[in-house]
Amino acid sequence: VSLRKLVAAAIAAAAIAVIAISCTAVLGLNGLSNAVDVMCTRCAGQLQFLGSHEDCVGYLERHLDALTDDERQKWLDAYVGQCSTCDRVTECFYWPKICTENGFACAQSGECCSSQDGGGCDGGSCQ
Amino acid sequence: MTLAGPLASLAPRALSAAAIGGVLLFAAPAARADDAAAADALFQQAKSLTEKQQWGEACPKFEASYKLDKTLGTLLNLADCEEHIDKTAAAWAHWGEAVELAEKAGDKRADYAGKRRAAIKDRVPKIQLDVTAGKSTLAVLRDGVRIDPAAYGVPLPSDPGEHTITVRRGEETLVTKKVTAKERETETIKLDLEAIERAAPPPPAPASSVQRKAGWGVLGTGVGLVVIAGGLELGAIVTKSQTNAAGACVSNLCTPSGYSTVSHARTLANAGQWLGIGGILVTAVGVTLVATAPSGKAAATEKPAAITVSPWAGPGGAGISVGGAL
């Protein structure tokens, strides 16, 4: 095998490696996570009233989808800025329209916004 | 008729011809000095041979001498020699050439050459090629010399004896015919080139053509893959920009819908990335195939290139492998 062929192969391999590494990285698509998934995984203990991990994720996704873009961005800013530690995660759960408001169907008392003030899930809806 | 005489071998070419013919006076202008000297030596040898009646050996020497130094005397001797060995067509042509040369120089020997030419005219055998060419591009050759299509159907002066008529496509001989030319006769050969072409269709494209075509095909596929890859990357950029505009991601965390969009963009980017890599490799293979395709005759003797292109897929990705013997 001639030196020229080796050099050509090395250059080709380097070019492919650069392309392979850089594509998603350049677009800033690497290292991003779903905030809800992180929240339910990392702070499962604090959010155990929502049930299993899947239930937790499902609940939060449903409620976030119901927000406007602006409301959703504000919630995300708050989560990243102040609720990313588990001791403060409930601040971002008991957030308007994220926790279940009075009169809306519920499964457990913990999900009701009123639970912070002694209310809870009664008869299938938050009271 | 004999030109040669006892004085001929002793005299210079022009003088010897003049002495023998009685009308040959001047030599043509000398060529390069060394060519002229060689021509003279050949001429003297030829004359010596004619004195011994060895015409068959003398004629080539006259011809060689004339090629080196185009003197009228040599040409006259050449024509006379050819007449002695019954190369009547060649003699007839050379007598004619001598007439032209002499007339151009204002030489009196033009009359002599003209008479000799006229005397031999009826003896010259002829071969007539009646060719039906149509759209055929096949070549017709007489004794290895290509006949201009304009000469088809024309009785062509030929030396007595056997002649070979061939029909060729490039270097390939399709038909060979033998014809014996006889004095005072015209032999006619009929050739239907279209029928010959139909009977022997052109061979399949040579390997070079196959490889080149395959190369262009692979190259085109590679470029196509790269273009598609570019489109996918563009799609990924647009999709990602949508998440940025909606503020769906902050720091490294995204809302579920934002994350879904990011995942979609990542899928597009990955697909574009691997397709792009594959496209670049396939393009490189195509360029190599085109660049290394043998050309012309070399390819005709080679075995066709065996090229295999096969897709592969694995846990780490997918692609196309190309291999084979060229």
Image (spheres, coloured by chain):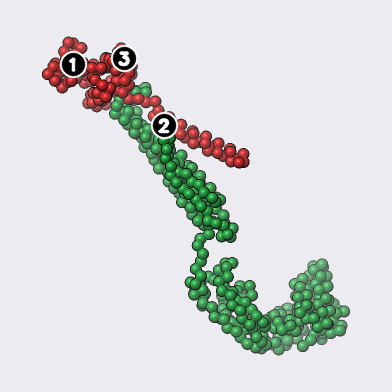
Chain colours: A red, B green
Residue found at x 24% / y 20%: A51
Residue at label 2?
Answer: A24
Above or below for B262 versus B86: above
The chain identifier of the residue carrying mark 2 reads A
**Pointer 1 and pointer 2 on the same chain:** yes
Instruction: Give the x, y percent position of residue B146.
Output: 61, 73
**Pointer 3 and pointer 1 on the same chain:** yes
Residue at label 3?
Answer: A86
Q: Spatial distance from mark 3 to mark 1, Cα to Cα? A: 20 Å
Q: Spatial distance from mark 1 to mark 2, Cα to Cα? A: 43 Å
Q: Nearer the viewer, mark 1 or mark 2?
A: 1
Q: Mark 2 falls on what kind of element?
A: helix
Q: Which of A60 and B17 is in front in this view?
A: A60
Instruction: Give the x, y percent position of residue A106.
Output: 17, 20
Above or below for A18 versus A105: below
Residue at label 1?
Answer: A109
**Amino acid type indicated by mark 2:** Thr
Residue found at x 83% / y 76%: B44
Above or below for B1 versus B264: below
Q: Is any atom of residue B72 visible in this view?
A: no
Q: Nearer the viewer, residue A11 or B1?
A: A11
Q: Earlier in the sequence, mark 1 or mark 2?
A: 2
Q: Which of B175 and B233 is in front in this view?
A: B175
Residue found at x 51% / y 77%: B192
Q: Mark 3 falls on what kind of element?
A: helix
How crowded is the residue under tag 3: few (<14 C-alpha within 10 Å), some, or many (20+)? some
- CB within 8 Å, label 3 to label 1: no
